[in-house]
């Protein structure tokens, strides 16, 4: 029988947790402000999308972020901050800086993973729809899968009024629930339900994209605007509600070389997608902080054969219109980093980023960062890049407001995380969809310059939208 040893181990763990949380409460009382208690608990391996599928009814708020190297899932909210307006990035960074100093970490399990600050921003600095213009939160439950291992961290707000016994009982229930899900998956591994059971009933193009391109081309002939990135939207009504965890798994399978993400607002709507574009990543170590950002602009489809694919790639690399569009983005990012006193390093010629159905011109850009330069300071400087807005930014952004027939919400905006050690990663929320029950609005954009052809730009948009639609349905 294994019940008695298991119960004994669980009892011992709960006692250790109680002692740790009691110490947190004493420190909170002494310092006269709340503490953020963080515990990492070893647990059986479980896929984060499967944990979301099992717990999404319990936790209406979730944040999912998956790369080729790791997957991060945040469920629930322990602390949060929201803001709008031109100083939204500063306010969010201040919130993170305050709470980083209030984290108390339990080292009893031998595994330490501090809380992640999970972030979502809308494209424009004023929220007009379903999501806050800026939101940062620490999840109550944090699941991280990396190097074949799964860890679960729990975060609790501790002050002199909380009931420690109730928190310990809550932790015990959450651990047992996750172990149950993990054991069930191990006994009978299976593929989840498909995102929807049949083809969508209604597909409707929200805007007349070709007409929008024709409308802005005369403006691009002048000296005031060099590039604008117009977005199109496709509305889909399915026969049954979309299965978010299954959609995330499908996106991760089809677009394993992209950043698969999902962010809910707690009231039903979910913004999700598979973005090829990293806004920035910061790797902090004892040797300093390293910034990597990407210039990603200029697109072409993949070929059906290896020879056709190579021919298309060569044409893309030598296409003057696509190269100009890409160079505009490179020069913008480099100029922004230089203004911060950084020394960007990058190749003189773009390389190719080849995805499942499309290929892009791609230039990685790197720089050493001083410790004083915060992640959200960089996000503010870089967002929006000319790859998703245009250049000059103010002129292009104003044109987007009056030209596009829908609100961008989180589309083409920064989504990512920061940790308490100075590491950070943000992507640009492109190749994305807003899901609400049976309804989905799919987004895609294309860079328009003076040499653009409306029909060619429409073909690029259709390629991006159909690829996302295919993965979802």
Image (cartoon, rainbow, N blue to C red):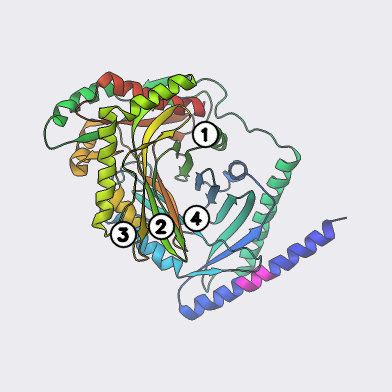
Q: CA distance from mark 4 to mark 2?
A: 30 Å
Highlighted range, magenta = 16-20
Under tag 4, what secondary structure? loop
Q: Position of residue 317 (x, y in %)?
A: 34, 30
Image quadrant of residue 213? top left
Sequence order check, earlier mark of 1 and 2 = 1
On whether residue 19 falls in the magenta region, the answer is yes
Give the residue pinned by disc 4.
77
Q: Position of residue 83 (x, y in %)?
A: 33, 54
Sequence order check, earlier mark of 4 and 3 = 4
Q: Residues within 10 Å of mark 1 (few under 14, many from 20)?
A: many
Q: Residues within 10 Å of mark 4 (few under 14, many from 20)?
A: some
Q: Nearer the viewer, mark 4 or mark 2?
A: 2
Give the residue pinned by disc 2.
290
Sequence order check, earlier mark of 4 and 1 = 4
Q: Nearer the viewer, residue 197 or 397?
A: 397
Q: CA distance from mark 4 to mark 3?
A: 21 Å
Under tag 1, what secondary structure? helix
Q: Which mark is residue 251?
A: 1
């Amino acid at each position: 029988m294994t019940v008695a040893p298991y119960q004994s181990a669980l009892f011992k763990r709960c006692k250790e947790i109680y002692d740790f949380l009691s110490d947190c409460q004493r420190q909170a009382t002494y310092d006269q402000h709340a503490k953020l208690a963080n515990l990492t608990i070893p647990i059986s391996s479980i896929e984060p999308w499967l944990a979301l599928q099992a717990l999404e009814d319990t936790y209406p708020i979730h944040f999912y972020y998956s790369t080729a190297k790791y997957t991060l899932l945040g469920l629930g909210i322990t602390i949060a901050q929201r803001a709008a307006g031109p100083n939204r990035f500063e306010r969010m960074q201040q919130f993170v800086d305050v709470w980083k100093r209030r984290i108390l970490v339990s080292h009893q399990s031998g595994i330490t993973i501090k809380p992640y600050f999970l972030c979502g921003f809308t494209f424009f600095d004023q929220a007009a729809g379903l999501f806050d213009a800026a939101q940062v939160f620490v999840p109550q439950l944090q699941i991280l899968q990396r190097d074949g291992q799964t860890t679960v961290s729990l975060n609790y707000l501790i002050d002199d009024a909380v009931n420690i016994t109730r928190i310990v009982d809550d932790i015990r229930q959450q651990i047992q629930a996750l172990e149950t899900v993990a054991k069930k998956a191990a006994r009978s591994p299976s593929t989840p339900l498909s995102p929807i059971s049949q083809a969508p009933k209604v597909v409707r193009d929200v805007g007349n994209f070709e007409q929008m391109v024709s409308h802005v081309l005369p403006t691009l002939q002048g000296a005031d605007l060099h590039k604008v990135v117009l977005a199109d939207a496709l509305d889909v009504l399915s026969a049954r509600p979309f299965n978010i965890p299954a959609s995330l798994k499908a996106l991760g399978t089809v677009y394993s070389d992209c950043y698969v993400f999902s962010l809910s607002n707690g009231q039903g709507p979910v913004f999700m997608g598979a973005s090829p574009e990293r806004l920035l990543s910061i790797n902090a170590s004892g040797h300093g902080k390293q910034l990597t950002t990407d210039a990603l602009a200029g697109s072409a489809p993949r070929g059906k054969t290896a020879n056709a694919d190579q021919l298309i790639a060569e044409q893309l690399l030598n296409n003057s219109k696509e190269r100009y569009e890409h160079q505009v983005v490179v020069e913008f990012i480099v100029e922004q980093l230089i203004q911060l006193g950084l020394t960007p390093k990058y190749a003189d010629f773009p390389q190719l980023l080849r995805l499942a159905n499309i290929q892009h011109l791609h230039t990685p850009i790197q720089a050493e960062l001083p410790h004083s330069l915060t992640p959200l300071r960089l996000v503010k400087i870089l967002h929006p890049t000319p790859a998703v807005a245009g250049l000059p930014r103010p002129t292009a952004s104003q044109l987007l407001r009056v030209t596009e027939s829908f609100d961008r919400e989180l589309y083409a905006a920064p989504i990512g995380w920061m940790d308490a050690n100075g590491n950070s990663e943000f992507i640009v929320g492109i190749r994305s969809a807003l899901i609400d029950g049976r309804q989905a609005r799919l987004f895609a954009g294309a860079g328009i310059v003076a040499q653009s052809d409306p029909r060619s730009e429409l073909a690029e948009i259709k390629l991006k939208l159909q690829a996302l639609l295919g993965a979802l349905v």
